[in-house]
Image (cartoon, rainbow, N blue to C red):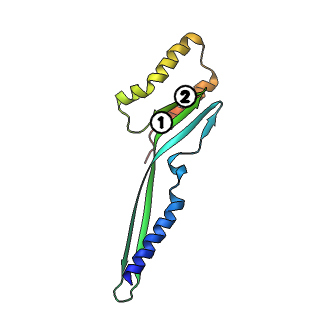
Amino acid sequence: MANTNIDGTISTLFHGMNGFVSSKSVVGDPIKVGDTIIIPLLDVNFGMAAGAFNKQTGNNAAGGIGAKLSPAAVLVISNGKTRLVNIKNQDAISKIIDMAPEIVDRITGFFKKEKTEEEEQIEQAVEEASKPAEE
């Protein structure tokens, strides 16, 4: 009898997980800023536990599931170019490596033209998205 309870509890937990963790949990909804699209990419961690106890038809069962979503990177699509910006656990070296294409763009852009207001808004949005979430 206890085996039936634990099977049912685990089955219910896995069934409920379908609605809890989806592909949108890993790839967030796109954010459009002017001609630029920013797509957040997330890390998903989850855990579950289930148990049952039958002391002669006590029919006890319990279960639980939990998840943690944390930002890992953002995909920036602008002017036909796609760039992946890592925002998770960055040290100084990885920040420089991630910023290298942006630095080259800034240097070449410095000689071409001033930044538009839209470009400044995009940079600000990327900077805000790259700040670690408060727990």
Q: Which residue is mark 1?
A: 130
Residue at horizontal 53%, vertical 45%? Answer: 27
- Percent from the top left, x then y, of residue 90? 38, 34
Rendering quarter of residue 55:
bottom left
Residue at horizontal 47%, vertical 23%? Answer: 101
* Picture quarter with the N terminus: bottom left
Residue at horizontal 50%, vertical 56%? Answer: 21
- Percent from the top left, x then y, of residue 86? 44, 35
Is the residue 119 above or below the residue 111 in the image? below
N-terminal of the two: label 2 or label 1? 2
Binning the other alpha carbons within 10 Å of mark 1 as few (below 14), some (14 to 19) or many (20 upward) gives some
The amino acid marked with disc number 1 is Ser
**Cβ atoms at labels 2 and 1 below 8 Å apart:** no
Rendering quarter of residue 120:
top right
Between 48 and 120, the one nearer to me in the picture:
48
Is the residue 51 above or below the residue 94 in the image? below
Between 12 and 103, the one nearer to me in the picture:
12
Decide if residue 105 is on the left or right side of residue 46: right
Decide if residue 24 is on the left or right side of residue 88: right
SS for tag 1? loop
- Percent from the top left, x then y, of residue 70? 45, 46
- Percent from the top left, x then y, of residue 37? 60, 35
SS for tag 2? helix
The amino acid marked with disc number 2 is Glu
Is the residue 43 above or below the residue 7 in the image? above
Is the residue 124 above or below the residue 116 in the image? below
Mark 2 to mark 1 CA distance (whole Å): 11 Å
Q: How many numbered discs?
A: 2
Q: Which residue is mark 2?
A: 123
